[in-house]
Image (spheres, rainbow, N blue to C red):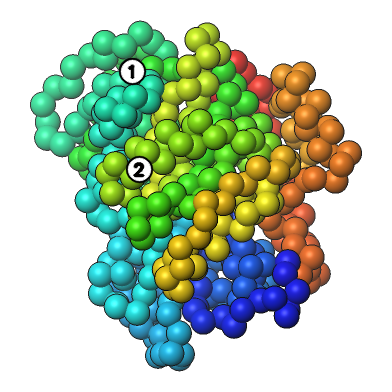
Amino acid sequence: MPSPSTIPACDFVPVILGGDIGAYALGREFHEAYGCTSICLVKQPIGAILHSSIFRHVPLGSLEPDEVIAAVERIHEEDPGRTILFLTNSEACIPAVLAVRDALPYVRTPTPSRDVIDQVSHKDRFAELCREHGLDAPASETVRLAGTDAIAACELPFPVVAKPAFSPEYAGYMSRGFKKVYFIERQAQLDELWRDLRAAGFAGTFIVQELIGGDDTYMDSVTLYIDSNGRPTLFGGANVLLEDHAPSMLGNPVAMITTSMPEVWQRCAEMLCAVGYRGYANFDVKRDPKTGRMLFLEVNPRIGRNSYYVCAAGVNPMRACVEDLVRGRALEPMRAENEILYTLVPLRLLRHYVRDEQLRARMERLVREGKVFDPQRYDKDRSIRRVADVLLTEWNQVRKFKRYYPEPTNTSF
């Protein structure tokens, strides 16, 4: 963290919509870079935020746009001289963030426009966009669940993966027992899924995608920031070691080794700039073990739950949006190129699941060198209750993996 003499006066108020580990990471990044206390706007945050000295919790009844707008207005009334920098790390919160930006002129947010989100965040449109810009995407089919018309049989070879085309319209269904991603081995399973979704009232779109082999270690994460002038100013990347396997969290990385990937960074930036993208973006990429191709699965219109890997690799990602949106300064491109091990889970879990010998060697070397980072473990925020919260979270990770993914597989399912 910079010394107090090098921290500029905090001329903005960071307001974070959401209260999970991704929200804590944003607050830590603001605190490291600017010495700011962040406001956490959510009904009930995790204990690591509730008992934190770098957060102030403002309770929120719901994510209805009018309620979120009213809450942000009250925050602004407390300190009308400062810009509100409004962020989220949750897909379900994006509509509320856009509503706040449209309604309140003193709010800045590093989130692209609605039109651009529609182009890049719908997985069917994203695949088309990738092909237009020379990026590989998995073979897929689009299934529209609105209405009662019969749904044609899948023409892709089984097994396949099924997932919602646009996460925000599906978010409420995960609390009703539906999964984030489905592994489908035969047509009968797919037919049953369509029946269940329609019976539950879901009228959105699903994507059925070819299954790309390889365990979690074949996944990569790419993080970028495109500034207000359309210039990419932040680049970060990591090789995933392990992902969450709980049904509602499936696919969220929990451990990574940061990696410089300049060619991939450039190709991602070119595609984003071509559609007028502004703000943070986080790509999910999978390397096909059979062909070596890099297949682009999706892009999230936010910095991503694991944004702290960029900070740990040498570049605080909050600088990109603060200098751009609050201070109007053009930054030179910042590349997070230091190699570190980022993990939200105990090392013993990683040693159980990482089977690739080269990756294991890299991981153990970084452990020996003391280059292991967990955003929850912050020396400037170490109350007894917070330490207990972090230990409880880690124990819960062990319990979840034992239940949902006791042994590694060649497909991650």
Residue 27 in which image quadrant:
bottom right
Q: Is residue 78 left or right of residue 347?
A: left
Residue 103: percent from the left, percent from the top? 25, 74
Q: CA distance from mark 2 to mark 1?
A: 21 Å
Q: Quadrant of residue 272?
A: top left
Of helix, strand and loop, which one carries label 2?
helix
In the image, taking residue 408 as reference, residue 85 lies left or right, namely: left
**Measured from the top left, where is residue 15 in percent x and y?**
48, 72
Per the image, the residue denoted by label 2 is: 272
Task: Report the side of 19 relative to 211 (left or right).
Answer: right
Image quarter where the N terminus lies is bottom right
User: Dot 1 corresponds to which residue?
Assistant: 139
User: As drawn, is 53 to the left or to the right of 30?
Assistant: right
Residue farthest along the right direction in this orientation: 368
Q: Residue at x 52, y 55 (%)?
A: 332
Q: Secondary structure at mark 1?
A: loop
- The answer to the question of whether label 2 and label 1 lie on touching residues, with beta carbons closer than 8 A, is no
Q: Is residue 294 visible?
A: yes
Q: Residues within 10 Å of mark 1 (few under 14, many from 20)?
A: few
Residue nearest the observer in this picture, 389 or 6: 6
Q: Amino acid at mark 2?
A: Leu
Amino acid at circle 1: Ala
In which quadrant will I find the C terminus? top right
For marks 2 and 1, give the one nearer the viewer.
2
Query: Residue drawn at (74%, 33%), measured in percent from left and top?
Result: 350
Image position, residue 299 (x, y; %): 40, 40
